[in-house]
Amino acid sequence: MRRTVAGIWDVPADGAAPALIVLAASFFLGAAAGCILASRVDGNALEGLGSYISAFLAVSGAGEVTAPALLPLLWETLRWPLITAVLGFTALGLLGIPILFAVRGFLLSFAAASFVKVLGGTGGLLAFLLFGISGMVSVPALFVLGVQGFNASRCLAGRALGEGKSRSPYGRKYFLRCGMCAAAFLVCVVLEYVAVSPLVAGVAGALSG
């Protein structure tokens, strides 16, 4: 059973490393840009950001934050893998998937860095609760989808450029990985719906108390 599962995750070695390097670099550059932008927020922008976070903490600490609505939560969690998966079925994914990863890295890091900018170390804890708990599952799963989608897009682009017919990248393992990643993202939805709000409310309540 273990070998079967390992085989499903085994992206061909000649394509996995280059795709992983490209996507990791894109994600890192986006994350670095998010951190730099958050660190340079000052003046009225910083005051507005601080007011927003303070209001969020006040509402959370008072226990007024309820579990998020399910449909918006599903969209918030599944939009990134859905777009990645769709791009993986087109040659456009060769450019679109790295851009998507850069945007994802930017938004995650900017949100987390903003909490740290306003609240210091406590902001780091809140950022982990808000983004890190589900991110520990969603980001690796997104990379799995991204790597195989990038390789598939590269194969399609090669065909379009007349490099000859190659074996279809959309085999049984491809769709099994998609299914396993879908299950991982559904776990993220459950975590966000059940666990994150109470944890954030507890920390916010301790801070306000």
Image (cartoon, rainbow, N blue to C red):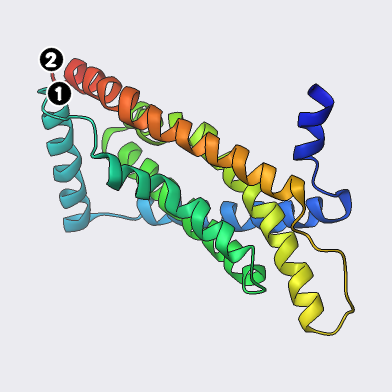
Q: In the rendered structure, which disc, 2 or 1, sits on the residue that comes first in sequence?
A: 1
Q: Work out whether residue 90 or residue 102 is closer to the camera in this orientation and state it.
A: 90
Is 51 rendered above or below residue 136?
Answer: below
Rendered-image quadrant of the C terminus: top left
The local crowd at label 2, few if under 14, some if 14 to 19, many if 20 or more residues have their Cα within 10 Å, is few
The local crowd at label 1, few if under 14, some if 14 to 19, many if 20 or more residues have their Cα within 10 Å, is many
Which amino acid is tagged 1?
Gly
From this viewpoint, is residue 132 visible?
no
Instruction: Name the residue: 75% across, 48% down.
Output: 172
Q: Is mark 1 on a helix, strand or loop?
A: helix
Residue 103 is left or right of residue 51, and the answer is: right
Which of label 2 and label 1 is nearer to you? Answer: 1
Is 173 rendered above or below residue 121?
Answer: below
Instruction: Name the residue: 17% across, 36% down.
Output: 56
**Residues under numbered marks 2 and 1 in contact, where contact means CB atoms less than 8 Å apart:** yes
Residue 136 is left or right of residue 158, and the answer is: left
| Residue of label 1 | 61
Instruction: Name the residue: 63% across, 71% down.
Output: 95
List x then y, in percent, for residue 161.
80, 84
